[in-house]
């Protein structure tokens, strides 16, 4: 299997599609947020270092994040491929990643910003991690998996989403050009249903 990076704007569906890829191809879905939290919870040296920055309200520096990612990629379950979600976010991180990993394909999820704002404005989440859209809830306000009350995240508010998209344009969008130059970028139009978009991604990965 391949070592995959998922690119795309916040709300484009990277996390959802990454989880489907991981399940379909039996490879780990590696989210930097998840592994940062895991290292902090387990009290690893890098976790303690990351926590010191978070507690101070600062961004975790690239070298700490790269160290945590590099350690994760060495674990047994990642030896036959993985899907990286939410990393790298900048050219500097991509260059650092190149020194510790060989990426085979960068899948860029392409969705218009207006569609993303509309999607996220209707997103509801549960403490158990499940995610829903109001268009599919039929008026329900509780989680189908655990029965707890769903909530609307502050960072899904339209004004917050637009600010996040502006940051993405400045910092993360240049990665598209970076991986295009390497000849490993594939653009996938993700304006269909989750299932339709996943079929397109599978076709790309199976080529």
Image (cartoon, rainbow, N blue to C red):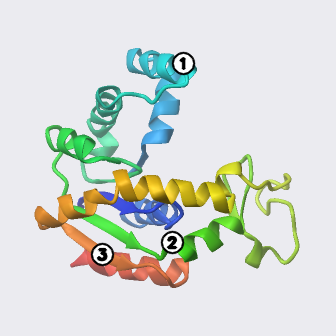
Dot 1, how many residues are within 10 Å of its Cα: few (below 14), some (14-19), or many (20+)? few
Q: Is residue 160 left or right of residue 128?
A: left
Between the residue at mark 1 and the residue at mark 2, the CA separation in whole angstroms equals 32 Å
CB under 8 Å between discs 3 and 2: no
Q: Is residue 53 above or below residue 73?
A: above
Q: Residue at x 87, y 63 (%)?
A: 141
Instruction: List the residue tagged with mark 2.
Output: 113
Q: Residue at x 26, y 35 (%)?
A: 74
Q: Position of residue 45 (x, y in %)?
A: 39, 14
- In the rendering, which numbered label is found on residue 56? 1
Dot 3, how many residues are within 10 Å of its Cα: few (below 14), some (14-19), or many (20+)? some
Instruction: List the residue tagged with mark 3.
Output: 187
Numbered disc 1: secondary structure: loop
Q: Is residue 3 left or right of residue 60?
A: left
Q: Is residue 106 above or below residue 103?
A: below
Numbered disc 3: secondary structure: strand
Numbered disc 2: secondary structure: helix
Residue 69, quarter of picture: top left
Dot 2, how many residues are within 10 Å of its Cα: few (below 14), some (14-19), or many (20+)? some
Q: Quadrant of the N terminus?
A: bottom left
């Amino acid at each position: 299997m391949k070592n995959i990076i998922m690119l795309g704007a916040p709300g484009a569906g990277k996390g959802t599609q990454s989880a489907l890829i991981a399940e379909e191809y039996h490879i780990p879905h590696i989210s930097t947020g998840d592994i940062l939290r895991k290292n902090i919870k387990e009290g690893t040296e890098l976790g303690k270092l990351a926590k010191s920055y978070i507690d101070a309200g600062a961004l975790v520096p690239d070298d700490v994040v790269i160290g945590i990612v590099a350690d994760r990629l060495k674990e047994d379950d990642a030896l036959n491929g993985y899907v990286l979600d939410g990393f790298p976010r900048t050219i500097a991180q991509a260059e650092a990643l190149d020194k510790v990993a060989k990426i085979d394909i960068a899948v860029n999820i392409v969705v218009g910003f207006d569609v993303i704002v509309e999607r996220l404005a209707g997103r509801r989440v549960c403490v158990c991690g499940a995610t829903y859209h109001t268009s599919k809830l039929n008026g329900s306000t509780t989680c189908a998996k655990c029965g707890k009350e769903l909530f609307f995240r502050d960072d899904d508010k339209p004004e917050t989403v637009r600010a996040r998209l502006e940051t993405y344009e400045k910092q993360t969008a240049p990665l598209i050009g970076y991986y295009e130059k390497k000849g490993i970028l594939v653009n996938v139009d993700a304006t269909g249903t989750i299932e339709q978009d996943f079929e397109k991604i599978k076709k790309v990965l199976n080529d």
